[in-house]
Image (spheres, helix red, strand yellow):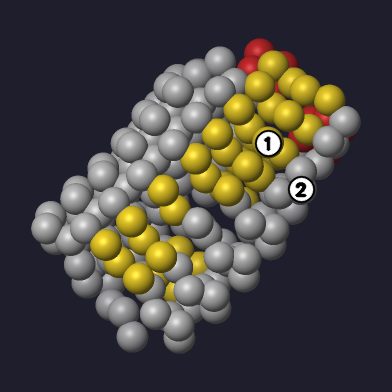
Amino acid sequence: LMGEKMFQNCTSLTYVSIPGGVTVIPERSFLGCSALSEVIFSEGLIGIGYGAFDSCAGLRQITLPAGLTYLSNYSFAGCALLTEIVIPSGVTEIPFACFERCASLTNVTLPSDITLIDAYAFHHCSSLSAIYYGGSVSDWQGMERYTFLWSAVWDWDNDTGEYTVFCTDGNISKEDAS
């Protein structure tokens, strides 16, 4: 139903409602739609492709549907006005640079299902102050979070705000969360 790059760089597009029947938003479908401020996802959506909403600088709010199972690299990178994201249960990974350059992103909610936060996942999310994690401190500490031994520039949380991870049984500061 939707093709790759279908609305790429459509700078006058302000609102999108993804119809039922669309299970995956293809790669770069809305890349560079800088005026896009609202997206409504229907139930039945299971995946968001590579760079699907990359550089949608006007996107302020999204509500991901409950049945979503995966995000892709750069899915929401460059959404500079996005302030909050709630990842639904069933999503297990935050891929490479998925929310990179979301400078206004302050709150992230992650389910306990998350097993990997990849490199650059929240790179340049300089306003990030709170990560609400559905698992325990022990679960967080056991989760794979990409860090690069020789250069912190590749870390999942490089150049983020001074966030706190709020777990079900305690909190973790940024310096202890990486």
Circle 1: is it few (<14), some (14-19), or many (20+) Cα within 10 Å?
A: some
Quarter of the C terminus within the rendering? top right
Could you tell whether 169 is left or right of 125 in the image? Answer: right
Q: Nearer the viewer, mark 1 or mark 2?
A: 1
* Residue 62 in sight from this viewpoint: yes
> At x 44% / y 41%, what residue is drawn?
99
Instruction: Pick the residue in front: 41 or 90.
Output: 41
Q: Is 141 on the left or on the right of 44, as rendered?
A: right
Q: Please, what secondary structure does the residue beneath circle 2 have?
A: loop
Spatial CA distance of label 1 from label 2 is 10 Å
The residue under the point 20% across, 67% down is 7
Percent position of residue 48, x then y: 45, 64
Q: Quadrant of residue 81?
A: top left
Task: Assess disc 2: are there few (<14), some (14-19) or many (≥20) residues with their C-alpha within 10 Å of its C-alpha.
Answer: many
Q: Is residue 52 left or right of residue 114?
A: left
Which residue position holds label 2? Answer: 112
**Residue of label 1:** 132
Sequence-first disc among 1 and 2: 2
137 up-or-down from 42: above or below: above
Which amino acid does the dot numbered 2 rest on?
Ser
Helix, strand or loop for disc 1:
strand
Question: Residue 74, position in %: x, y?
Answer: 39, 49
Q: Amino acid at mark 1?
A: Tyr
Q: Residue at x 56, y 23 (%)?
A: 129
Q: Give residue 33's quadrant in the image.
A: bottom left
- Residue 82, position in %: x, y? 39, 40
**Residue 11 location, x and y as percent?**
12, 55
The residue sitting at 43% across, 22% down in the picture is 126
Of the pair 16 and 21, the residue shown nearer to us: 16
